[in-house]
Amino acid sequence: MFSGLPQSAQEFTDWTWSQIEPYYLDLADRPLNAATAGAWLQDWTHLSQLVSETHERLMVATTVDTTDQDAERRYGDFLEEIQPSSQAVEQKLKEKLLASGLEPEGLEVPMRNMRSEAELFREANLPLLSEELKLITEYDKITGAQTVIWEGEEITIIQLQPVEQSVERSLRERAWMVMAARQLADREAINTLWVRFLEMRLQLAANAGMPDYRSYRWQQLLRFDYTPQDSKRFQGAIEQVVVPAAGRIYEKRRQRLGVDVLRPWDLKVDPWGRLPLRPYKTITELEERTSTIFRRMDPQLGEYFEIMRRESLLDLDNRVGKAQGGYCIEYPVAKRPFIFTNAVGLHDDVITLLHEGGHAFHVFESNHLPYHQQHYVPIEFAEVASNGMELLATPYLSTDEGGFYTQVDAARAVVELLETDLLFWPYMAVVDAFQHWVYENPNAALEPSNCDEQWAELWGRFMPGVDWSGLEQEMVTGWQRKGHIHQDPFYYIEYGLALLGAVQVWRNAQSDQAATVAAYRKALSLGGTAPLPQLFAAAGADFAFDPGTLSHAVELMEETITTLESVQGL
């Protein structure tokens, strides 16, 4: 009967559950043994991927235009009618495979994951998980509607960000204050949504018989290779190693700007008073130069990106009504990635596209894996693919290599990237530590003012160097503006761990770029078929939390910054 299934998700999009369910029932009833396992797994894969890609395409439609009520309705219908039912039957199929005693080649790690998921599954949680996705859409609508009037024109907050790079300090301050005021206007709306998020997550954990939501989420994220205590150890390593390095960066910036104290609007301007880097004028130019970088790095990577351009799998420009942020998702039936960003002409846009390009390459490189269970990649390594691509691309940023900048500006761009990465680790520690506090103290966290207080305490611990006097409300509500806290709990330490892995990959490239890129691609091709430490090792890195590994990374980054500043004559 599976010959009747559509070959594309576009044909499948309007299918109802009554049309889909018979295929799941067929899989549930069909004999499963060594002789039939291959065909059974292939049919399950195709059906599951159709459902998954339909979800992704409907979700994408709500982010490319948050005002599209029809898209929101269709996505909501899917979340209500198909998602819970398909998840319930998917669980039965997992249980069937586990009960069979089979362990097909290449499914050792996925089978481990399935055992964990089966243990966590509760049918009572299916409607809650669907409702959680709706709340995520609500958060996107709130932030996507944040526009301001600037010089007589209504623009998005993101479109105002380039003004933060102005050499005129008073202009930067005014722009920053306008943005902050608009974000604070949604304080109560986000507080209300936060309570709903938190109550729902506590119920998810209770339904699953877990002692707390962190335990539930840890298992849901399939974190087998490190513990919450490892996360806290990493926070401590950051405090010991990176916070002092960040302090050196801030102090150097303060001196170069010639100001008594750094203020929040002093962090994005060039400290030497140079005009901001403006790497491109049009989205087409952004795409073309990025494509050249990928092609120079590796011809196959360049071809992957060109496929995305030809098949309209890029939505890069910022516009009113578009959700904030950026992402890359997989369309598993089409075997294609889709990249979403909010480009406004900044160097950050280049870095974002390189980052999401790394995720896209993960999709392409792992397409050969036959079963959908093999395509789940631990986020900690998925972000090595993306952060690693940012760093591996640095030799190609100059126009001599087909990139965006003169040699001097390319050096400047790499310095900005490395300083941004160094400053990221302490911020990541704030976000991660905040979430541990929330789910260790959920009753206190249900009161948003307590969240404000805890955020301020962590900010003081990890983020010294910038004066927030008179801006206390803007500072304490920083947790409201970090989408991961609301939409993807505990999904943030991955970036910090992955950055440490990516710097190690970049270190290897210093001596042999071609071999490093080859190892990188090989590691991506493993998909989710190896444990996390092995994935890191395949790419040439250690999966680490300790001060020593972090120190080696920070030393390399600071030494490179010093070298590249001399290239600029600074």
Image: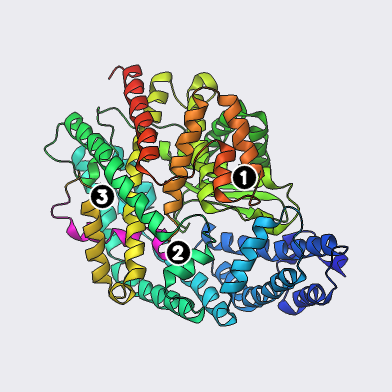
What amino acid type should be assigned to the residue bearing mark 2? Answer: Gln
Q: Report the span colored magenta.
A: 468-486
Considering depth in this image, is 196 or 207 the residue closer to the camera? 207
Please report the residue visible at 83 percent of the width from the left and 59 percent of the height from the top.
Answer: 38
**In x, y percent, where is residue 309?**
64, 41
| Mark 3 element type | helix
Inspect the image, locate mark 1, and give the three-letter code of the amino acid beneath it.
Answer: His
| View extreme (left): residue | 260
* Circle nearer the N terminus (2, 1): 1
Q: Residues within 10 Å of mark 3 (few under 14, many from 20)?
A: many
Q: For residue 483: magenta?
A: yes
Of callouts 2 and 3, which one flags the residue occurring earlier in the amino acid sequence?
Answer: 3
Q: Which residue is mark 2?
A: 487
Main SS, magenta residues? helix
Res. 198 image quadrant = bottom left
- Say which amino acid is labelled 3: Phe
Q: Residue furthest front?
A: 101
What quarter of the picture does the N terminus occupy? bottom right
Q: Circle 1 sits in a helix, a strand or a loop, which is it?
A: helix
How far apart are the alpha carbons under marks 2 and 3?
23 Å
User: In the picture provided, is 108 more to the left or to the right than 404?
Assistant: right
Q: Which of label 2 and label 1 is nearer to you?
A: 1
Residue 518: image quadrant is: top right
